[in-house]
Image (spheres, rainbow, N blue to C red):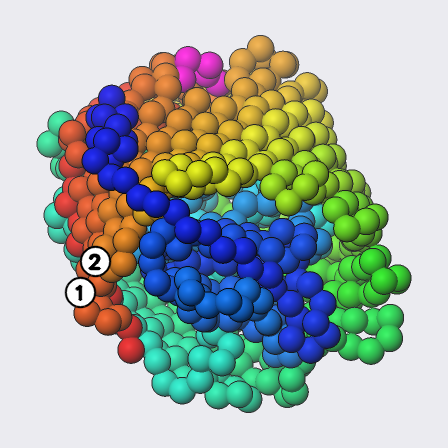
Amino acid sequence: MKLISFILLVFAFLQVNAQEKEYQIFNQETNQIIANSVIYLTQSNQQIESGLDGKFTIDFNNKKQIKIHVISLGYESLHTTLKANDSDKTLFLIPLENQLPEVLISGSIFKDPVMNITTPDLTEKVTQPKNVTDLFKNINGFGLIKRGNYAIDPSFRAAQYEQLNIQYDNGTKVMHACPNRMDPITTHVIPEDISKIEVIRGPYSMRYGASFGGIINMVSKQPELGDYGFSGNVSSGYETNGNALVNMLRLQFAKEKFDVVGMYGYRDFGNYEDGANREIPSSFRSIDYSLRLGYNFSTNERLQLHWRQSFGRDVLHASLPMDSDFDDSSIISIDYYKKQMQGKLKGIQAKVYFSYVDHLMSNTRRSNFAAAEAFTPVEATTAGGRFELEWELAEKWNLFTGTDALLISRDGVRNRLVKLNMMGVPLENPMAFTDKIWQDSYINDYGVFAQSKYQINNSTILNAGIRYDLVQSESRDPETDFTEYYPNLSQRSEHNFSGSISAKKMLNNNHQLELAYGRGVRSANMIERFINHFQVGQDPFEYIGNPNLDAEINNQFEIAYKGKKKLGKNINTINWSAAVYYSYFENYIVALIDETKTRKFMPNQEPIHPKVFRNLNEAYKTGFEAGFGIQFLNNFNFNADLAYVYARNQDLNESLPLTPPLRTSFSLQYSKGKFWAGTDLRLVSEQSDLASSFGENKNTPAYELLDFRLGYEIVSNLNLGAAVLNIFNKQYYDHLNFAFRNQADAGLNGMERLTDPGRNFTFFIKYGF
């Protein structure tokens, strides 16, 4: 009601008059029309798109001039000022000869994959320190799986972990070392370095690795072409709830032939308080830095080296049995491309990368340390790359062919020193044990793919792709009991075939229709294959892997529609979108209680029987996302988003695990000149459709959150942002939050879910030069 009242007040007290002019965009060299460009109104932070005829409309609203930034794939960006009294209504873009490495989303109907989402620039209008996963909160269809304030995984349409193909900069990966996922892929990058997130909403592209539930590409901020010389920015942020402090420095030097970008980030987060003013163990410190070097051999050939390291220290995980003493990662990647080649072969792209994660967790800060010490050093290495050729088979027919590889290996043990016997009496000679966690295991995936794009006419494009993956896996140092469960343990090879077909149709300049079918195949991950009597779930069960699991298959169908309409003076533009999907799963992997096996560690403690990963016979999910937006009074934007997914384990007649409830969000933003402000309202419904086999035994209550943000450019390039999050200090937790674990000293019940932060005041200042 507060949000609606605010909108009505705005309409009542503000009146404006519109003045519209139509412009058209052309190629400066050929004078051909350029379709589907993106035009940013820099002062109001609004975005519009040109049509197939290259035309777009600007509403001056009695302004004398408006600054714009025009972006179109294959052309240099254009920064210019449009004047209301200028008779010239044409814009010219210069063909781009020195392109940056290709990413998934380009902003063009004829280049983009189907069913994609891309965020605006996430480095703008910052109001708070954040983790990378915070960047997903405002993307429709996403949720966050939380075990604390650090170990956070994104979830999309009830797909999570390796069901999502998460990567950096078009292919770079780093896999977690911890079996409890204390160090997911999103913790190994500087959040302020991520300029946007690109999503393909299902298994609809074969080019970027095996995909089951979708592809997520986190794009680093790149030097803008033509932005030569020395530049950079420095920023600092603070949160009152937890006394969180973040400092970041970015330096860049660019010339026509080469560019260098360096970044440094420091984060120090304390324990936060929830809405009931309880202190939640969640503190951590981290230091990150990165260095990116680029060299342009010619106007269409580039080589880039990217090196980054992250160092996490004293990370507390309220919903995991141990904490991280340290978590260190190193990532190096090399990218090469050559574009605009003559003949049928139009382009070459190549990438190689390597990452290493060194992780130590222990229970030194937990109450059970007095009875038994536990130290777990583990490590993970990830190596891979991709090589792709782009062919022009005909004027409107492109083919992408290539190969890629993803090589993952992990090892590590848990060293235990038992100091009390089962009656609680101290042992004269404490007993030492070593438990194999990863059992020196590896999973190697070698893929080949072909994907074709055919432009049927000026408004329709057809996509089709196929993919083959050879997956090899092995445990090279298995525990004795694991070999007893699986006596024929040896290297295993799997042969996975994926494919997709889709169509995209521009019904006219303002309406777009998409249809897609994808068959995505995912082989079991290392936890599902090789974990041995370790607690990795949301419940207190021990889990046992199964190296004989069949690969999961997602047969996904989707239809999506989006449109927009320009209106009159007070209400400028409305836009809307909707997507409906259905997935039929084959061999869906879940962990089920196995009463033929018994608990290995603390055998007298409930539950006695462990869980073993199995394939389901029948499972499915269906759902939808919808969005509505309205731009009014030139400086206001209102958006509403809705997302729902229904997932079913038909074998057990229950929901699939980690299925989020209905989520709705509303946002109202005002932007004029140097000032902007916005309010966000999130409504999350009760979740009563549970996966009891996963440990979801209690309905998750609904909750509502209201946030307010504002920012101001104090002087040129000096921006100040502030926010109040969870304004009403709501005590709440999300259905995807794990339960508290081993937190007796903190007075937190293991039957209760991790609660999120209460009211939080945040401040952020950034200076660019």
Amino acid of disc 2: Tyr
760 relative to 16 in the view: left or right: left
Q: Quadrant of the C terminus?
A: bottom left
Q: Quadrant of residue 264?
A: bottom left
**Residue 226's spot in the image, x, y percent?**
49, 80
Q: Nearer the viewer, residue 410 or 766?
A: 766
Q: Is residue 395 above or below residue 335?
A: above
Please tell me which residue is depicted at 51% across the width and 77% down the height of the picture.
225
Q: Is residue 102 above or below residue 696?
A: below
Q: Quadrant of residue 114?
A: top right
Disc 2 target residue: 712
683 relative to 745 in the view: left or right: right
Q: Nearer the viewer, residue 555 or 354?
A: 555
Please tell me which residue is depicted at 18% across the width and 51% down the height of the picture.
722
Marks 2/1: CA distance? 6 Å
Find residue 121 and name its label.
none
Q: Find out whether residue 44 is within the magenta segment.
A: no
SS state under label 1? strand
SS state under label 2? strand
Amino acid of disc 1: Ile
Please tell me which residue is depicted at 51% across the width and 71% down the height of the picture.
78
**Residue 575's spot in the image, x, y percent?**
50, 37
Q: Which residues are magenta?
A: 687-691
Disc 1 target residue: 714
220 relative to 503 in the view: left or right: left
Q: Quadrant of the N terminus?
A: top left
